[in-house]
Amino acid sequence: MTELYSYSLELSIVVVTYNSRDHVPGCLESVSRAAGNFDHEIIVVDNASEDGTPERVRQQFPNVRLFTNRDNRGHAQGNNQGMVASRGRYILLLNPDTVVQPGALLAMIQEMKHSPGIGLLGCRLLNADGSLQKSFGFEVSFLNEAVRKFFFNLWDNHRFPPAGWVLKMLHSRKREVAWVKGACMLLCRQAVFDAELMDENFFMYLEDADLSRRLRQLGWKVRYTPEAEVIHFGGGSTGSNPGKVALEHRRSQLHYFKKHLGHTRLNALKYYLRLKMRKNILWLNVRQWVGWGSREQLAEQKLYLQEILSLTRNFH
């Protein structure tokens, strides 16, 4: 084993923040309690927050190792920064808009220790109201994306009972999965450094699916356990600018298809996105013409749609 993989603690918790002032205290308090049985450290990497997040961390959590970046380096690069600085045998990557439930970390680490070969372990994610949240996914593809959008999203958005039943069945037992949601991921240090950390071309979104895929290609297992629960509020760092979020999501999607699925599927994705963006721009023009909604907001939405359209033309 090389020096790169050496460790001096049982557990490192890495939290990447961006304008997370309201969420991060609850997250850090919960993870501090949950990690009390382990030799551990907590690392916060702040991506140039403008809402006083790092100041709040310094004031309320003086024992946290805090790194402050001058610009927003994105989720993948922030996590890599924290992992390189970490000293744990296991590394927990945790979103700031989460609350770790009692016993969750103990259950996850026991699962890692009792099942050799696990490189990445995900847990049962819950919404703020205690309902189940989709915590893992199948292989990234057009078909699985359609199933997510037109079936599972009916549970997220409308609490459609059949979607909830299927979701509950899928999340009821331990299982190997294609990828786990990046809100809470427990990594074996050896595995994540074998995979050379996260791909920093993913600014946000799909870095979790990419890392999971590369770990499986190296022979590591990616698993899910329902025996650990974490509340994930969602949107803690992204809710203030949905247009920018949509643009970065599409950029990550294009990169993932290029990297893993080949040029034929990449070109198919580009064609689909062009059709979708043109349709959405047309609808915004109709709304603007009849006076449905704020002209400023409609113009801003149209600008981001046009940026995504330009991205599909220039992405190679």
Image (cartoon, helix red, strand yellow):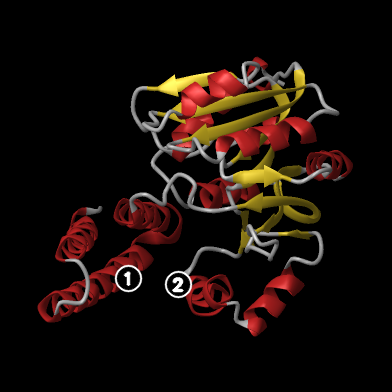
Q: CA distance from mark 1 to mark 2?
A: 9 Å
Q: Which residue is mark 1?
A: 268
Foreground pick, 131 / 177: 131
Left or right of residue 249, residue 26 in this image: right
Residue 4 falls in which quadrant of the image? top right
Left or right of residue 292, residue 247 in this image: right
Residue found at x 63% / y 57%? 128
Foreground pick, 258 / 201: 201
Res. 55 visible in picture: yes
Disc 2 on helix, strand or loop? helix
Q: Earlier in the sequence, mark 1 or mark 2?
A: 2
Instruction: Kindly indicate whether the residue at mark 2 contacts the one at mark 1 (C-beta within 8 angstroms).
Output: yes
Amino acid type for the residue under numbered disc 2: Phe
Return the x and y of residue 299 as percentages of the image width and height: 15, 62
Foreground pick, 167 / 137: 167
Within 10 Å of disc 2 (Cα), the crowding (few <14, some 14-19, many 20+) is few
